[in-house]
Structures are given as structure tokens and as C-alpha cells.
Image (cartoon, helix red, strand yellow):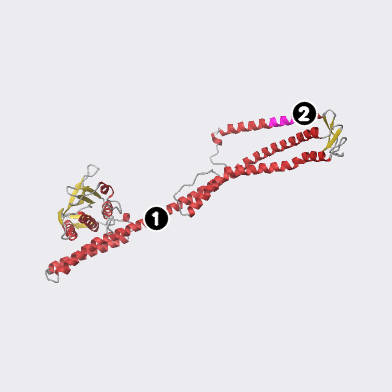
Amino acid sequence: MGDGIQMEEMRETGETTQSFCVKGQRGREAGKAGAHRPRRRRKRGRSLRHSLYYCIPLCVIFAYIGIMAIGHGTNYLQEWYMLNFMETENARIWEDGYEFIISPNGDIYRSYVGKEMPAPIYAEGHRDLPQRIVYWLISYGQVVLVPLWILACVGLTVWIFYKREIEKPLRVLREASERIADNCLDFEMEPVKDNELGQLRNGFEKMRAALYENNRATWQQLEERKRLNAAFAHDMRTPITVLKGYGEMLERYVPEGRISREKLLEILGMMNGQIRRLESYTQKMSSIRKLEDLEPETAPVSAADLGGKLKNICAILGQSRIDISFSFEGEGTLRLDEALVLEVCENLVSNAVRYAVKNMQVTVRVTEEERETSGENPERCLEITVEDDGSGFSPEDLRHGVEPFYRGEGQMEQSHFGLGLYICRLICAKCGGSLTLSNGICGGRVTARFKLGCEENP
């Protein structure tokens, strides 16, 4: 009877287990079939809540399997202990409404007697207290093992959920916050899953990128301001040198009476012109935030007057140490920014004076260049070429000579900032022209071109 009940229960348990497995297999196959449907694909990753919902059934399944294993294991251990360590002759054991009868040959018979009847652990036979205690411990050990197993399953589920969903995002966010706190913004956060923590990571990444761009913009503004100040100081030196030359000339010849009144007035007029140009340049430099914002202001200028001013600049900067040959080819009225043209000429001549040995050649002429579009009149340009008899440009100078703060070999003196050619290039570009470095027959050659506006002939 007992064996029949056991076999029936085992069949029912097996059918239930088989049914559960079949349903699970069908569910997995349905899930795979659904996964291949494009319209059901999730565009975004699972949220933390959905991931937790997936972990809870696994926890329940493992807990159920463990509880069943504990129950069957304790039952088997009870029977094994009763057969091997207890006096079994004519033994009768009642437990939870069931009566176990052990025959002398070791067979076990079980029958239901009802829970209302007393159920002694051990009856008829040798009543040994230690054996009863061990049997009781085995019987009620599952009361302790089942809660412990449930706690273990819950702890394992929490650990898996933390490892899969939380650990990496927290590590990425912690490392990013530490770097941001140290003002280290030149990095990219490691990608994580597209869930709530992933969205938080994306927010951190946007904040880091915004801080990085703001800091870079601030740094660029500071660099531009630094470069602007250095360029301003550099360009102030040349007009001051011109004024100093005129002042020394007056100081030397006026006390001796060797300068006529007309020549004195001429020199004073040129000094006033330099002062006005210096004032204009100062106002222009102070009104811009960076060199690239410089805008030329063209106006009609007489070609003869421009040639005379350029010649005077060459004479003052060359002084008596350098023999400067000056030539000018042009006539009529030119439309250009005279202050910028004179500024470029001063910078080019000043640079050439430092490297020239004895002679320099400054050539200024109006040229015509063919337009890219055929059928149109050629463009008129003002071209200033400065050549010296020095050692010329090295290959490195030709590549980087027009870059800001570039100084070649032997140019480490404090008065030279490496901005002269850079400023000339910027001014020429703003005036629609260009600046070209090359080597001539005897030394270096620099050519500056300015695009002329609509000229008016007298």
C-alpha cells in the first residue's frame, strides 16, 4: 500500500515536472520566434525594473528546486537512519498522521492514521533516547535548511543583479566624478547598458563634454588675449623706433643749426604722421578681441604719397648700417587701408634689417593678376617685396615662418617674439592678399600682396 502511494506520488511529480519543462521549452521557443520578428525588437535596453523582473523567477525556480531536494533528502535520510541504526523489530512509528510499520525483515509499510491520533516518534521496540533525538533532528532539519536555502537564493539573485546591472555603471560614474573633481576633462566615459544608470551616465558624459568645451573656449580666449597683447607690444616697438630716429636726428642737428626751417617742419610733419598712425593702430588693436577679427578700412590713397611714406620708413629703419635700395612702380589713386600696408612694410623691413649684412632691396609695385573666372578684368594688387643679403630661410623657416611665436635658430633674444610675419600674414589675408616666403639670389625674400579696391585715376 505504501509503495503504491509512493509510486503514485512519484508519477504525479514526474508528470508535473515534465509538464513544467515542456511549458518552459515552448516558452523559450516562442521567445526565440518572437525575437526574430523585427517589429518586436526593443530599440532600447531593459530598464532596471524589467531586469529585476527577469531575475525574480530564476530565484523562485532555484528556491523551489532546492526545497524539493531538501524534502526528499531528509526523507531518504530518515529511512536510511531508521533501517541502519534503530531497533526495527515490530517497530511502529507515527509522524504527521502517517504510521510507519517496520517488519522484522526490514520492509517498511506506511499508512495514514489521521492527525487527530497521537503520533509517538517511536513505539513497540527498543526505545533508545539518543536514537530518537537523532531521528528528530533529521526530521526537523529541513525546517532550518529551507529558510537558509531561500536566503541563499535571494542573496545569489541580488549578487547576480548587482554584477550585471549596477557594478559597472557605478564604477564608471565614480571614476568620472573623480576625474572631473581633479579638473581632468579630456576623456570619454566607458559605455554601459541602456537603462536608468546608462541614462545617468549619458547625462554625466554631456556634462563632462560641456565642461570640456567651456574650459577649452576659456583657454583659447586666454591664449588669444595673450597673443594679442604680445602682438600689440611687438608692433608698438617699430613706430617708436621710427619716432626715436626722428628725435635723435633733431637732437643732433637742430642745436648746430644744420637743419633748415623747411626740413624741420617736414620732419615734424612725418613725426606727427607716425604719431597719428600709432594712435590709429592702438585704437584698432584695443577694439578687437583677437587678431582674426581685424577688418581693413579702405580709402583712396595717392600712389605717390604712399611711395614716399614707404621710402621714409625704409630710410629710418635702415639707418646708416644697412644700405636699402627702394623702388616704387605705380601711379594714380589706390584704394586700400594705408595704415595696414605701412604696418606690413615696417614689419618686413624690420625683420630683414636683423638678418641683412650690408644691402637690402625693397620693391613696391602695382601688378595685375588673372582672375580664376575667365572673361573678367584682372585683379590689381599692391606687391611689396623685401630682399636681404643674409643667410636666407632654412627649410624649417619656410614651413613654419608665418606661424605665431615661431623663432628659428639664433632668434632667442627677448625682443623678438616671432609675431612679425604672422601679423603680416593675417593682415594680408584680411586685405584679400597673401604673404610668401622664399629665398632669393643672395638671401631671404618675403613678398606681401594686397588686393586693391576700385581705383580712381586723376
Which quadrant: the C terminus?
bottom left
In the image, 173: left or right of 345?
right
Classify mark 2: helix, strand or loop.
Answer: helix
Quadrant housing residue 51:
top right
Q: Secondary structure at mark 1?
A: helix
Of residues 97 and 287, the one nearer the viewer is: 97
Badge 2 crowding class, 10 Å Cα cut-off, few under 14, some 14 to 19, many 20 or more, is few
Whole-percent x and y of residue 305? 17, 59
How far apart are the alpha carbons under marks 2 and 1? 84 Å
**Residue 409, placed above or below residue 114:** below
Place of residue 172 in the rendered image (x, y in percent of width and height, measured from the top left): 52, 47
Give the main secondary structure of the magenta stretch: helix
Q: Residue at x 32, y 55 (%)?
A: 293
User: Residue at point 23% right, 65% down?
Assistant: 275
Q: Which residue is mark 2?
A: 7
Q: Which residues are magenta?
A: 3-19
Q: Which of the image's four quarters has the N terminus?
A: top right
- Give the left or right position of residue 53, taking residue 222 as reference: right
Looking at the image, which is closer to me, 2 or 403? Answer: 2
Q: Count of labels shown?
A: 2
- Check residue 72 for magenta coloring: no
Q: Judge left or right: residue 262 versus residue 452.
A: left
Amino acid at circle 1: Trp
Quadrant of residue 76 in the image? top right
Residue type at numbered disc 2: Met
Tag 1 residue = 219
Which is in the foreground here, disc 2 or disc 1? 2
Please tell me the numbered disc located at residue 368: none
